[in-house]
Amino acid sequence: MSAHHFPTSRHGRATGRGMGLIDALIALALLAFGLLGMTRMQTSLVRQSTESQARLTAAQLGDELLSTVLVDVANAGCYTLPDAGTCPSETARARAEDWEARVVAALPGDVEATSALAMGQFTVTITWTGKDSGETRTLEATTDVRP
């Protein structure tokens, strides 16, 4: 019987240990890239959520002024912004100015709220700057206001 001597016993273990370390480093690198991708996705979702919330707020505030005008059609001119049209009611004018102040406080960036009454239609326009995107956003809503 001949004894076979395999040269890989000592050398093979060292190579195996080195390969395990390389495998672990590759796995760690893949995990790091995956986590980085998830972080970017989460940031994007938060940004979109913020923009969506601003649009929802603008829509609610625009609807609020339109509804107020529909309830108080006789004083529709009082709700035109920035300058009041024909306005026999100081209460209605104060409501319009309060609404304008709440719009400016509720939306991000540079905010402008205008409204106009022309030919039996009342139009509300709200413009603001997106918080994260820096882009100008506009909401415009119109309703008929005939007594």
Image (tube, rainbow, N blue to C red):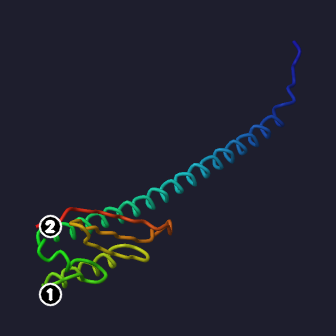
At 69% across and 42% down in the image, what residue appears? 23
Which one is in front, 12 or 2?
12
Q: Is residue 3 left or right of residue 143?
A: right
* Residue 40 coordinates in the image, percent (x, y): 54, 56
Q: What amino acid type is highlighted by mark number 2? A: Leu
What is the spatial separation of the Cα atoms under label 2 and label 1, in whole angstroms?
17 Å
- Give 105 or 12, whichever is nearer the viewer: 105
Tag 1 secondary structure: helix
Q: Quadrant of the C terminus?
A: bottom left
Identify the image quadrant of residue 127.
Answer: bottom left
The residue pinned by badge 1 equals 90
Q: Residue at x 43, y 75 (%)?
A: 109
Q: Classify 41 as above or below 128.
A: above
Quarter location, residue 137:
bottom left
- Classed neighbour count for the residue bearing mark 2: other residues with Cα under 10 Å, few (<14), some (14–19), many (≥20): some
Q: Position of residue 30 (x, y in %)?
A: 63, 46
Q: Position of residue 8 (x, y in %)?
A: 84, 31
Amino acid type at mark 1? Glu
- Residue bearing mark 2: 70
Q: Are marks 2 and 1 in contact (CB under 8 Å)?
A: no
Q: Quarter holding the N terminus? A: top right
Which residue: 74% across, 40% down? Answer: 19
Classify 4 as above or below 17.
Answer: above
- Which of the marked residues, 2 or 1, is nearer the chain's N terminus? 2
At horizontal 29% and vertical 83% (from top left) the residue drawn is 83
Q: Is residue 73 left or right of residue 112?
A: left
Mark 1 burial class by Cα count in 10 Å: few <14, some 14-19, many 20+: few
